[in-house]
């Protein structure tokens, strides 16, 4: 009998708040987490706005010495993972430790630390580089520290597939549970690269919004006047669990994960093909692995970056996959409020997908005032929607042409 995999815990550290409830209510209320950059003087930059995590107090979670040795992306990931485990009610005893895996996604590791110590190297010499430099910057340090914190001794992986990394992590965790490599997995994505190099680099690509005078209105997926994405930081982690394990301990179940697709555009380092062909294959693979027809999907949490190319191409891809049903399902982009968390985006959006199914409520696409004529679907504009959601999909597409899609549905015995 095929193993079934359910979501039993959610943990969120986002620009909308620390904790799942604060973030979720912020989403439903259409609140923006975007504002002027405070991490550095951005006055010389074309883009001067970002979605920063606010009110994060690492001393609540870590010893003072640890705070100095763990990069922010690791701290965010560990805290979100611990929240997810607490929410799940799971106790990781020595008896089950080797059956608990950790699989995380991260796009860029610690660029801020690389920036900092490159300056130290040039100004003060190599002997002034901290011995913690390498352990701070490696992308797998999030999954490593989560496993140490939780005593999770099962499969441990860190994926770095640009903006698809968080969704790939969730999909791979799902596969590992299906295959029997583990029974439980803490999975999602984390990122923190709001620094001069990242902001300057993305701006040089003309990828970032320069609506600096109106940060809360700057992320406007599918809107005619969108001009780029907003760089963001944070982490989203969920607990995936084999159904019988969850039932045996009476766990709360948010949703069931049933499908996973992944593909490559094999087209361009940054731009999607105009017909969205790679995304089309990815969504179809997810539907196929879920043994579902397109008409069974009620909601898509879109990649929806607020860039001119992505939103148009993703809309084309959705219409190709879903045909007439594309106009009947709901599509929304939570990046309109959270900004784009790069490798962490798929983690928070997997959490949002499970919460949408659990609460039967769709977060809105904010700032959608004048729809782009090329974007003509139901994007749930500006107001959350309470509705029936039987099954839902989350899309993530990354530089290098890498694509990831997961499908969850309402849990039924």
Image: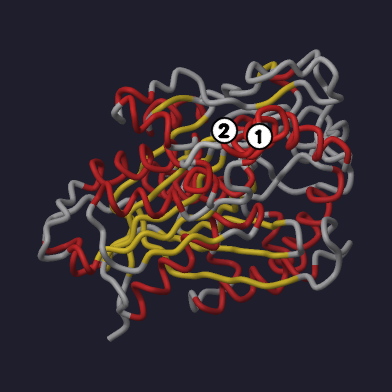
Q: Residue at x 73, y 37 (%)?
A: 198
- Towards the viewer: 410 or 14: 14
* Total numbered labels placed on residues in the image: 2
Q: Residue at x 80, y 70 (%)?
A: 277
Q: Which residue is mark 1?
A: 125
Picture layout, residue 39 above or below residue 385: above
> At 55% from the left edge and 32% from the top edge, which residue is drawn?
384
231 vs 354, left or right, is: right
Q: Is residue 21 above or below residue 148?
A: above
Name which quarter of the figure residue 83 lies in. Answer: top left
Nearer-the-camera pick, 191 or 222: 191
Q: Which residue is mark 2?
A: 128
Secondary structure state at the residue bearing disc 2: helix
- At 70% across and 59% down in the image, what residue appears? 326
Q: Position of residue 34 (x, y in %)?
A: 64, 23
Image quadrant for the N terminus?
bottom left
Residue 36 is situated, as x and y percent measured from the top left of the image, at: 69, 16
Q: Give me the disc on residue 310.
A: none
Instruction: Name the image quarter holding the C terminus.
Output: bottom left
Horizontal arrangement in the rendering, residue 179 relative to residue 245 (left or right): right
- What is the spatial separation of the Cα atoms under label 1 and label 2, in whole angstroms? 6 Å
Residue nearest the viewer, comparing 230 with 335 = 230
């Amino acid at each position: 009998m095929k193993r079934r995999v359910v979501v039993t815990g959610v943990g969120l550290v986002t620009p909308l708040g620390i904790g799942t409830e604060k973030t979720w209510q912020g989403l439903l209320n259409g609140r923006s987490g975007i504002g002027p950059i405070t991490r550095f003087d951005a006055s010389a930059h074309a883009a001067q706005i970002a979605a920063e995590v606010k009110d994060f107090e690492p001393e609540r979670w870590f010893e003072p010495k640890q705070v100095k040795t763990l990069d922010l992306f690791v701290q965010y990931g560990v805290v979100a993972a611990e929240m997810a485990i607490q929410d799940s009610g799971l106790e990781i005893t020595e008896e089950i430790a080797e059956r608990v895996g950790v699989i995380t996604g991260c796009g860029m590791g610690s660029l801020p630390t690389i920036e900092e110590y490159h300056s130290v190297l040039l100004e003060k010499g190599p002997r002034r580089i901290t011995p913690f430099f390498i352990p701070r910057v490696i992308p797998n340090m999030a999954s490593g520290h989560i496993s140490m914190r939780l005593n999770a001794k099962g499969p441990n992986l860190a994926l770095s597939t640009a903006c698809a990394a968080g969704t790939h992590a969730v999909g791979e965790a799902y596969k590992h549970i299906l295959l029997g490599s583990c029974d439980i997995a803490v999975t999602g994505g984390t990122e923190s690269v709001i620094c001069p190099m990242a902001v300057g680099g993305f701006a040089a690509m003309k990828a970032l919004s320069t609506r600096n005078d109106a940060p809360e209105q700057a992320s406007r997926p599918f809107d005619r006047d969108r001009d780029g994405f907003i760089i963001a930081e944070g982490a989203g982690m969920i607990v995936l669990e084999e159904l019988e394990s969850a039932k045996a301990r009476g766990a709360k179940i948010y949703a069931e994960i049933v499908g996973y697709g992944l593909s490559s555009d094999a087209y361009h380092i940054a731009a999607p093909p105009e017909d969205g062909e790679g995304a089309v294959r990815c969504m179809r693979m997810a539907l196929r692995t879920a043994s579902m027809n397109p008409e069974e999907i009620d909601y898509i949490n879109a990649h929806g970056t607020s860039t001119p190319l992505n939103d148009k191409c993703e809309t084309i891809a959705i219409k190709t996959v879903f045909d007439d049903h594309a106009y009947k399902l709901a599509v929304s982009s939570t990046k309109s409020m959270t900004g784009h968390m790069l490798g962490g985006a798929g983690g928070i959006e997997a959490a949002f997908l499970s919460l949408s199914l659990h609460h039967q409520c769709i977060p809105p696409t904010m700032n959608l005032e004048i729809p782009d004529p090329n974007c003509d679907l139901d994007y749930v504009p500006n107001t959350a929607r309470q509705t029936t959601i039987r099954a839902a999909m989350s899309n993530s597409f990354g530089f290098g042409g890498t694509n990831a899609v997961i499908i969850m549905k309402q849990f039924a015995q």
